[in-house]
Image (tube, rainbow, N blue to C red):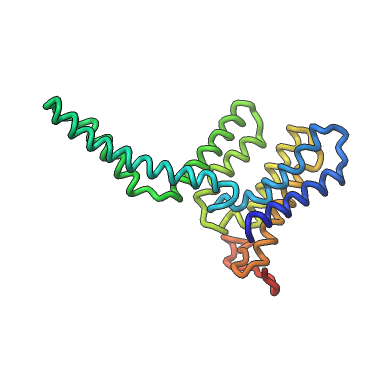
Amino acid sequence: MKGRTHLAIGAAIGVAATIYYQPHQWEQAVFYLPAAAFSALSADLDGTSMLSSKLGKASHWLREGALWLGLAAVVASFAVQGFQGMPQTRLFLAGAVLALLGLVLKEGALRNALVSACGAALLFAGLSAGLNGLMGLGAFVVIAPWLKHRGLTHTIWAAAAWTAIGAAFERELHVEGLAVVAGAAYLSHLVADTLTPAGVKWLSPLSKMTFRSPITF
C-alpha cells in the first residue's frame, strides 16, 4: 500500500492510544502519535518510502554533483598544466575518481548509505547516552535499507524486534504503552501489505509462503 495509507493507519493508532492511556502529563501524550506514525512507516525503510524520499533526492544530487565536479577537476588539471607547465596528477586523479563514482554508483545505493548514516548517528547517540531504545532504533535504521524490499523487515520477527525497541523506549522514557503502540503500528503495516496482490512473507526466512488476503486493494 501507499505510504500515505500506512501513515493514516499509524496516526489513527496513535490517537487511539492517547485516548486509551489518558496520560496525566502532556510530555507523555506527545509520544504516542509520532511513535505510531513512524512505526507504521518503518518497515519500508528497506526501499524507497516516505521516510527516505528526501534522502533519495539528496542522493540524486550527490551523484550528479560527484560526476560534474569530477569532470570539472579533470578539465582544470589540464588547464592548470597548460598555464603552469606542470602536471597536476593529484587533481586529475581526484577528478577522475569523483567522475567514476558519479557514473558507477546508483542513486539507490547512495540513498541507502544516507539512511544508514542517519541510523549510525542514532546508534552513536544511544551509545553515548546509554539508551537501549535509541541504540536499537539506530541499529534497525542502519541495517534495514540494505535488505530486500518486503523481505526481512516485513516479517513477524521484525515486528517483534521493533516491539522490543518500543519496550526499551517505554522503560527509559516512562511512557506507558509505548511498546504496544509501536508494535501495533508496525504490525498494521504488515497487515495492510497483506491486503495487496504482492502479499507479505510473514515467516521468512523460515518459510517462503506469501500471505495474501482473498480480498486485495
Tally of marks:
0
Residue 71, position in %: x, y? 27, 40
Q: Quick one: 30 or 172, which is closer to the camera?
A: 30
Q: Quick one: 185 or 56, which is closer to the camera?
A: 56
Residue 201, position in %: x, y? 61, 63
Residue 16 located left or right of residue 165: right
Q: Is the residue 21 above or below the residue 202 in the image?
A: above
Q: Residue at x 71, y 43 (%)?
A: 35
Residue 99 located left or right of residue 182: left
Q: Quadrant of the C terminus?
A: bottom right
Q: Is the residue 14 above or below the residue 2 in the image?
A: above
Residue 99 located left or right of residue 55: left
Residue 45, position in %: x, y? 57, 49
Q: Is the residue 15 above or below the residue 120 in the image?
A: below
Residue lying at the far left of the rendered structure: 85
Q: Quadrant of the N terminus?
A: bottom right
Residue 26, position in %: x, y? 82, 33
Q: Residue at x 45, y 44 (%)?
A: 59
Q: Residue at x 64, y 28 (%)?
A: 130
Q: Residue at x 64, y 50 (%)?
A: 41
* Residue 190 found in image quarter: bottom right
Q: Quick one: 128 or 81, which is closer to the camera?
A: 81
